[in-house]
Amino acid sequence: MNISPEATRSENELAGPKVTVLTRDTEFRGTVGFTGELQLNGRLEGEILSEDGTLVIGDTALVKADIRAKKVVVRGQVFGNILARERLELVGSAQVFGDVQTGALAIEQGAVFVGKSESLQADKVERPDADSIFKLLPLAGKEGAPARPLKGIEAAKPLAPIGGRPVEKEKEKGSSS
């Protein structure tokens, strides 16, 4: 009797990646854990957790939850913090109100993000010395003094002309000299 290698594989291996879809009529409260991909189109309040999964929050979704997953794609509304270890994408009319931590952040035009973002890559990237970059420009004021923002009346004053010469205004057409 000859058994093919195909016959020895489990049903899950042949089916490909596992995708779970929660339709727009669903509403959950509590903690949701998943593997594979979860497509959420309804409402959820609580917590969403996945070690290796991809969470897709659909256009019709409303989520009030803290989220931890490998990859998160938001098209709907999220009120809560997001930790996307690999990547976070805010697509189309996405709205995220909360702080995010991610390896990579992509925000498409039209998406709204209100919160703080922190890169999980920060420890892997060497931060350049900004003082050494700007060697050609003199410091404002005296040597070694940091530039300061202009305030009040000082901010409203016109800048001094280049070369110390006043700039003459162009005479209006039709006016007599």
Image (spheres, grey):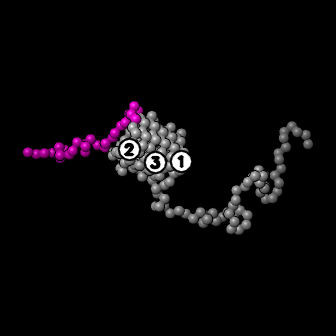
Q: Are marks 3 and 1 in contact (CB under 8 Å)?
A: no
- Disc 2 crowd rating (10 Å Cα; few below 14, some 14-19, many 20+) is some
Q: Residue 95 at x, y = what percent?
A: 51, 40
Q: Identify the residue under disc 3.
A: 82
**Residue at 82% of width from left, 45% of height from top?**
170
Taking the magenta stretch, the answer to whether it contains residue 72 is no
The one of 31 and 158 positioned closer to us in this rendering: 31
- Label 3: state its secondary structure: strand
Q: Position of residue 140 (x, y in %)?
A: 71, 62
Quarter where residue 24 is shown:
top left
Residue placed most toward the observer, 89 or 170: 89
Does the rendering let one see residue 75?
no
Picture residue at 45% right of the left edge, 53% below the top: 103
The span from disc 2 to disc 3 (Cα, nearest Å) is: 14 Å
Q: Quadrant of the C terminus?
A: top right
Q: Which residues are magenta?
A: 1-27
Res. 154 in view: yes
Residue of label 2: 31
Separation of disc 3 and disc 1 at Cα? 11 Å
Amino acid carrying label 2: it is Thr
Name the N-terminal-most of marks 3 and 1.
3
Query: Where 170 falls versus 123 (above or below)?
Result: above
Instruction: Indicate whether residue 19 is drawn in magenta.
Output: yes
Q: Which residue is mark 1?
A: 115
Q: Position of residue 17 (x, y in %)?
A: 31, 43
Label 1 or label 2, whichever comes before in sequence order? 2
Residue type marked 1: Gly
- On the rendered image, what quadrant is the N terminus found in? top left
Q: Residue at x 54, y 45 (%)?
A: 114
The Cα atoms of the two marked residues, 1 and 2, are separated by: 23 Å
